[in-house]
Image: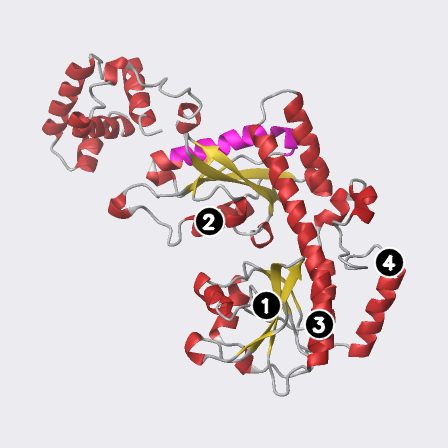
Amino acid sequence: MYEGRSRLRDNGEVTADRRSERASDPGGPGDGPGGGPGDDHRGEHRDDHRSEHRDDHRGDYQDLVDEISALLGAPATLENRDFELIAFGAYDSDEELDASALDPVRTRSILTRRSTAAVRAWFEGFGITRATGPVRIPPTPEAGVYRGRICLPVRHRSVVLGYVWLLDGDPGPTERQLAAAMEVTGRIGALLVDEVRHRADLTRELRAVLTAQDGWRRDMAIAELRTGLGERAEAVHTVVCVAPWPSADPDDAPSVRTVPGAVARCTVPWGTTGQSLALLVRLRSPDAPAPALTAAARLLERAAPGGGPAPGGGPAAVVAGVAVPRRALAELGAAWREATAATRAALAEPRLGPVASWASIGPYRLLTALPPRTAHDPAVRELLSPAHRDLARTTEVFLDCAGQAGRAAAELGIHRQTLYYRLSRVERLTGLDLDDGEDRLLLHMALKSRRL
C-alpha cells in the first residue's frame, strides 16, 4: 500500500466546492439513492457519450482522492481491489517529509505501482474485503509495516471495488471525518463500476474483432470497437498474445491501467482446450514498439511468476508474441495472426522467446501459416520418430549451419567423420539427397515444423 502526497486545502472549502459541483450537475455520479453512471436515468445519454466517459476517469478519481485528503487532513491513495494504483495525493512541498512513512511495504508499492500477493493477503487478513466502514491496521514492523494504516473500502451495491489508504497518526481522523470520507468513497465506487462495465464492453468487442470471420459480423465488431475506443481508435496499435494463459477470465490478468500503453484485453481459445490472452497496445509510432514489449513482459510475470525456461532447460512454460504495428483497426485480425504465430514460434524454438516479435521469427513466419500437419512429409516420418531423435537433431544443426560440416560438428561436439556417418544414415532413412537444395529445403522445413 502506498499513500501519495497532496497539497491539502481547507476542509470546509473543499466540501463547499463539492456541494456546489453536485448542485450544478444533477446527473453526476452518486447523486440520489444508488446514483451512478450505470443508472437508468442516464441511459438515454449513454450511447452518445460512450467514448467520452469511458476514455479516462483519472481526473475524476484524482479530484475525489484530493477531497478525501482534505477531509481527513492527511494524504490518501486510491487502489483497485487488486491493489493497483489509481490515484494519489502528494505531501505539501513546504512540509518536511517524514522518513518513517517510507516503510518497506510502502516503498515497494511506490516503485512498482502495485503490491505483492503476500502483502495483499496480509492486508486482506484484517477483513478489508468484507468491511463496510473504516478499518484500522496497526503497525507491524516484522511485516515491513512501520506505520499504521486506515483503509476505507470502496464499495458499490455491496461489492468491494477498491480501497482508499492513508497513514494513521496521533491524533488520527475523527469518526465524523471518517464518515464524511466514506461518503466520498461511494462516489468513487460509482466511477469504478462504470469503468468495470466499460472494460467488459471492450473485452467483448476486442474478442469479436480478433475471432470474427470476414464479412458483416467482422465489420460490425470493428465498428463497435472503434466506438468504444473513441479518439484512441486512430492511434497506432499492436497486439500481444500470451500463451498458454492459465485462466479463461481476463480479469485474472493485470489491469490495463497498470500495463503501459494497454487499451483492452480478452481471452481467446488456444488449441483444443487451452486459453491465450490478447492485449491491444497503443504505440506512439510504428517504430516504437517498447510499450508492447514491456506489456508482454508484465503479462508473463503474472502468468508464470519467476519466468525463465522450464526445468531441465526446456522451452519456457508461457511465452508471448508481438505483432507488427498497425494503423487501422480493420487490420487487427491480421495482427492477431502474427502475434499467435510469434507465440507458437517461441514455444517451438526457445531461443526466440520468451517474448518474440513476428518480424524476428524468420522461417517460422511461413511455417506457422501452413495448415496443421501440412509439413509432415512421408519422407521424413521415420526420421522424426523417437528412435531417431539424435539423427534428427544432427540433421537440423547441419542445415542450420548452412551445410558447413566443421561448424555443425563443433556445435554438436562430435568428430566430423561421426557427422558424415550420421548424415549418410539420414539419407538412407529418408531417401533424400543432402547435396540437393530442394531435398534440403524439404527436410529443414519438416524438422522446424515438427515442434509447432
Q: Is residue 331 magenta?
A: yes
Q: Is residue 2 visible?
A: yes
Q: Residue at x 70, y 52 (%)?
A: 56
Q: Is residue 159 above or below residue 206?
A: below
Q: Is residue 47 above or below residue 378?
A: below
Gap in angstroms between the C-alphas marked 3 and 4: 20 Å
The residue at which mark 3 appears reads as 181
The residue at which mark 2 appears reads as 297
Q: Residues within 10 Å of mark 4 (few under 14, many from 20)?
A: few
The residue at which mark 1 appears reads as 131
* N-terminal label among 1 and 4: 4
Residue 189 point in image, percent of width and height: 68, 59
Residue 381 point in image, percent of width and height: 24, 18
Q: Residue at x 35, y 43 (%)?
A: 317
The part of the chain drawn in magenta is 327-345
Gap in angstroms between the C-alphas marked 3 and 2: 38 Å
Give the amino acid type for the residue marked by disc 1 in the picture: Ala
Q: Residues within 10 Å of mark 1 (few under 14, many from 20)?
A: some
* N-terminal label among 2 and 1: 1
Give the amino acid type for the residue marked by disc 4 in the picture: Asp
Q: Is residue 190 magenta?
A: no
Label 1: which secondary element: loop
Gap in angstroms between the C-alphas marked 3 and 1: 15 Å
Q: Are marks 4 and 2 in contact (CB under 8 Å)?
A: no
Q: Are marks 2 and 1 in contact (CB under 8 Å)?
A: no
* N-terminal label among 3 and 2: 3
Foreground of the two, 343 or 86: 86
Q: Residues within 10 Å of mark 2 (few under 14, many from 20)?
A: some
Gap in angstroms between the C-alphas marked 4 and 2: 43 Å
Q: Residue at x 11, y 33 (%)?
A: 415
Give the amino acid type for the residue marked by disc 3 in the picture: Ala
